[in-house]
Amino acid sequence: MQTRTSDVHERRVSERASSINESTIFVIAGEAKRMQAQGIDVISLSTGEPDFPTPEIIKQAGIKAIADNFTKYTQSDGIPELRAAIA
């Protein structure tokens, strides 16, 4: 069997990459999960992940948006029709 060059070289991470710390948001999220596993009632506001399933009306709206090719970024001040509906 022939040895590949990539098998011979040791993989190293640069000093700069090694100095990157874990995101504080994920540290907080991890702590919230540990507390929940201990039975502590926690409302985690760390990563913006809801603790409930996506409502059906939102799922259907997403499917319709994809089918209608409404998949690009909006202008920075938002979608005029949506802004009017919310106002």
Image: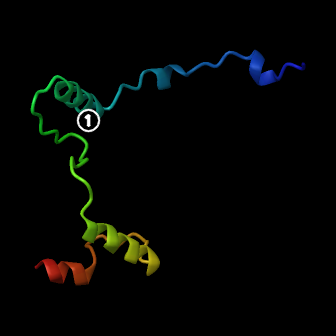
Depth check: 51 or 16 in front? 51
Residue sitting at 23 percent across and 47 percent down? 48
Q: Residue furthest right?
A: 1
Q: Position of residue 30 (x, y in %)?
A: 26, 28
Depth check: 78 or 55 in front? 55
Quadrant (top left/top right/bottom left/bottom right) for the C terminus:
bottom left
Q: Against 19, is 44 above or below?
A: below
Quadrant (top left/top right/bottom left/bottom right) for the N terminus:
top right
* Amino acid at dot 1: Ile
Question: Viewed as shown, does residue 3 lie left or right of 24?
Answer: right
Q: Position of residue 67 (x, y in %)?
A: 45, 78
Residue sitting at 39 percent across and 72 percent down? 63
Residue with the mark numbered 1: 25
Residue sitting at 33 percent across and 72 percent down? 60
Q: Position of residue 17 (x, y in %)?
A: 49, 26
Q: Position of residue 79 (x, y in %)?
A: 28, 78
